[in-house]
């Protein structure tokens, strides 16, 4: 529209890491928000342009390889997952690319266990950060301070909690990169007026039998992260 | 886990329609939920298996063509969009497939303007339904009764409001297809404990200047839907 502020259009370069068995909702919530940024380019970046299948069976096609993405980014973003995330943390090429782009990016960001990938690349040492609740304690393996919150901002590191936190995170990023009115406009466009039919979305609110069931499922995860930390030689010590 | 109820595993066949320039967050929110159903098969269905690019530039690969999907479905689902959705409504092959599968599906469902595709296929005539707020009034072009709500259930038709309503819709579907405990477990797993940083997600709560700006952008949409309704000869009359 002709009466929009000139500052609403900016040549942002946003790189969203993609890897096999990532949780695609971690990626797509924020991608909706980033894609709304006038003037921005949103790269879906992977080692190659081969299609990538998520942990829920959705196959997407990356738009750029690691080498093709600009060296200087406005935003570096990492989505989470479970075994696919551990594999990405173990992968030298992925870790080195994240460390390199993250060293210069204006914002270094993640949703869910994506913060463990940032950590494995050494980007969260000495920072407050959050993660999916099932992996939160494991951040300390890499010298980060775990914070139980929906979104944690520490200097230019902005991390979101599990999966659906990507919506809250994405709107927060729009306010960072533009302003509150811009973010509110996009919120109205995607009708983000949540009405969860149940109140089980946090370990603090879920019924005890639900929490016990899911906690048992994810209990091995922090130990698996610790193993990766030792293997790659990045630790808090 | 060994102590899960036997009824939690069921051979559900879930078909999620995919088409060019759909809004991929409409698809991926519910897909996360459906993919959690033990025993279920979630098909990402399109006219061909060629990659499809969404309105935010995400390219996905369908898992099945219209002909490959089972004739009898547990759930038929349609995501929304804007011009891509109008094109899907105009497309005879898409409309006929939706009408055919919808005539036998146990649940006929949508998020966002996906309900306009169901309508164009004749599946919402005489039903209460919802839609993205920008397209809600247009449901009446097809003999449906628009309801301003996050999720609307009328017999076996379950429709969700715009984009992010897919999360609320998806959890509701898990309770329909399994039970409340199952849905709550998945809610905890995806940490759906929303904390929108702003309160602009509904036309009833957005600041007036934000609402005016976005309403001006989407104002032409109902008229475009009316044109499609006339063109394809499906109308309320």
Image (tube, coloured by chain):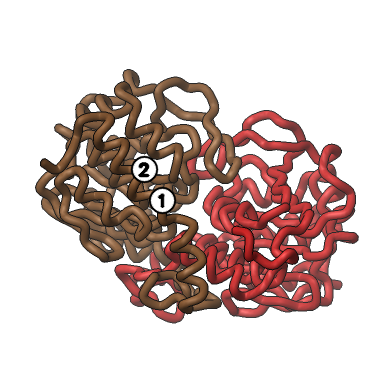
Chain colours: A red, B brown
Quarter the C terminus of chain A occupies: bottom right
Q: Residues within 10 Å of mark 2 (few under 14, many from 20)?
A: some
Residue extending furthest front? Answer: A2
SS state under label 1: loop
* Residue, disc 2: B224
Residue B230 image position (x, y, % from top left): 24, 34
* Tag 2 secondary structure: helix
Which of A206 and A33 lies nearest the eye of the viewer?
A33
| Quarter residue A172 falls in | bottom right
Residue A28 seen anywhere in this rendered image of the structure:
yes
* Residue B54 position within the rendered picture, expressed as x and y whole percent measured from the top left: 53, 39
Q: Could you tell me which residue is drawn at 86 percent across and 58 percent down?
A: A233
Mark 1 Cα shell of 10 Å, populated few (<14), some (14-19), many (≥20): few
How far, Cα to Cα, is label 2 from label 1? 6 Å
Location of residue A167 with respect to A96 vertically, above or below: below
Labels 2 and 1 share a subunit: yes
Q: Which residue is mark 1?
A: B220
Question: Answer yes or no: do the residues labelled 2 and 1 have beta carbons within 8 Å?
Answer: yes
A212, B12: nearer the viewer: B12
Question: What percent of the width, then of the height, locates residue B115?
Answer: 29, 46
The answer to whether residue A216 is visible is no
Q: Residue at x 85, y 46 (%)?
A: A70
Say which mark, if any, is on residue B36: none
Of residues B45 and A144, the one nearer the viewer is B45
Q: The N terminus of chain A appears in which quarter of the rendering?
A: bottom right
Tell me the chain of label 1: B
**Towards the viewer: A139 or B230:** B230
Give above or below for A15 relative to A173: above
């Amino acid at each position: 529209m002709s009466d929009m502020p000139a500052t609403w259009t900016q040549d942002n370069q946003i790189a969203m890491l993609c890897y096999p068995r990532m949780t695609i909702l971690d990626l797509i919530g924020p991608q909706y928000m980033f894609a709304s940024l006038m003037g921005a380019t949103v790269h879906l970046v992977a080692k190659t342009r081969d299609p990538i299948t998520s942990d829920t069976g959705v196959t997407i096609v990356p738009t750029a390889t690691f080498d093709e993405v600009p060296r200087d980014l406005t935003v570096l973003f990492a989505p989470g997952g479970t075994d696919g995330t551990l594999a990405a943390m173990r992968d030298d090429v992925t870790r080195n690319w994240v460390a390199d782009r993250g060293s210069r990016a204006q914002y270094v960001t993640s949703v869910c266990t994506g913060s463990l990938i940032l950590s494995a690349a050494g980007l969260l040492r000495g920072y407050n950060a959050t993660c999916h609740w099932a992996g939160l304690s494991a951040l300390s393996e890499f010298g980060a301070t775990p914070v139980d919150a929906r979104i944690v901002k520490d200097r230019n590191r902005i991390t979101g909690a599990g999966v659906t936190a990507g919506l809250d995170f994405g709107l927060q990023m729009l306010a960072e990169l533009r302003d509150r009115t811009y973010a509110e406009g996009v919120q109205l466009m995607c009708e983000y007026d949540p009405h969860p039919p149940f109140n089980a979305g946090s370990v603090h609110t879920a019924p005890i039998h639900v929490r016990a069931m899911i906690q048992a499922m994810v209990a091995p995860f922090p130990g698996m992260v610790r193993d990766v930390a030792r293997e790659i030689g990045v630790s808090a010590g």
